Amino acid sequence: MTTRFALRVAVILAFGIGTGWALTAADKPGPDKAAVERTREQILMLDDLYKTAVVGISQTYAAQQFDTPAAVVAGAVFDAMKKKGWHAARLVDATGKPKRKDNIADTPFEKKAIEAIQGGKKYFEEIGEANGKPVLRAATIVPAVLKQCASCHNVKEGDLLGAIVYEVPIK
């Protein structure tokens, strides 16, 4: 780089800093589209895994009148994954009558997601940031898929119970 070019760059930067010019969040480039797509696929895989596990647990244990609902077991798995640094996931109520107060939508994303899901969407997402790094936030529907689910939640089979909300790092 020539001295003249370096001087021009320095003047431009000094002018920008002196006038308050700076990149805003809107000016920053977003995460790579391919990385977002890989993360989206990962969320869909996790969603299939968790829902298959909850249904399997319900079919095996709830039918035998065990005291611990499958959703409690799923919550423990979600907590373990978060503690290990993989991703965050949690159940969020969409009925207005949550089984646990911990299942109420807390964040702006969760509130938008539940509204979208109550409006008929089966999947809702946004790209955001957590700890200065890009994440994909997504929510997927959780209907009462078994008689055990409907009975415990006092709804009909197929009724919407809530969503699983994910926050997965985009890499």
Image (cartoon, helix red, strand yellow):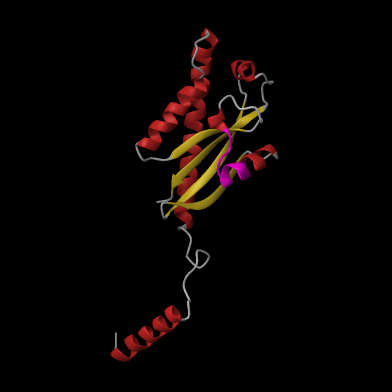
The mark tally for this picture is: 0
Q: Position of residue 155 (x, y in %)?
A: 68, 21
Q: Main secondary structure of the magenta part?
A: helix
Q: Image height check: is 143 above or below 4? A: above
Question: At which x and y percent is residue 21?
Answer: 48, 76
Q: Residue furthest bottom?
A: 4
Q: Position of residue 105 (x, y in %)?
A: 58, 38
Residue range of the region highlighted in magenta in the rendering: 104-113
Name the residue nearer the viewer: 60 or 21: 21
- Residue at screen point 56% across, 29% down: 101
In the rendered image of this protein, does residue 3 appear above or below residue 119? below
Above or below 165: residue 70: above
- In this view, the residue farthest toward the top is 64
Q: Viewer-proximal residue, 41 or 6?
A: 6
109 part of magenta stretch = yes
- Split into 4 quadrants, where in the image is the N terminus? bottom left
Q: Residue at x 67, y 21 (%)?
A: 157
* Residue 154 spot, x, y in % from top left: 66, 18
When asked about the image quadrant of residue 80, the answer is top left
Image quarter for residue 112?
top right
- At x 53%, y 8%, the residue is 65
- Give whichever of 62, 16 is nearer the camera: 16
| Residue under the image location 58 percent in, 46 percent down | 108
In-image side of 100 versus 23 (left or right): right
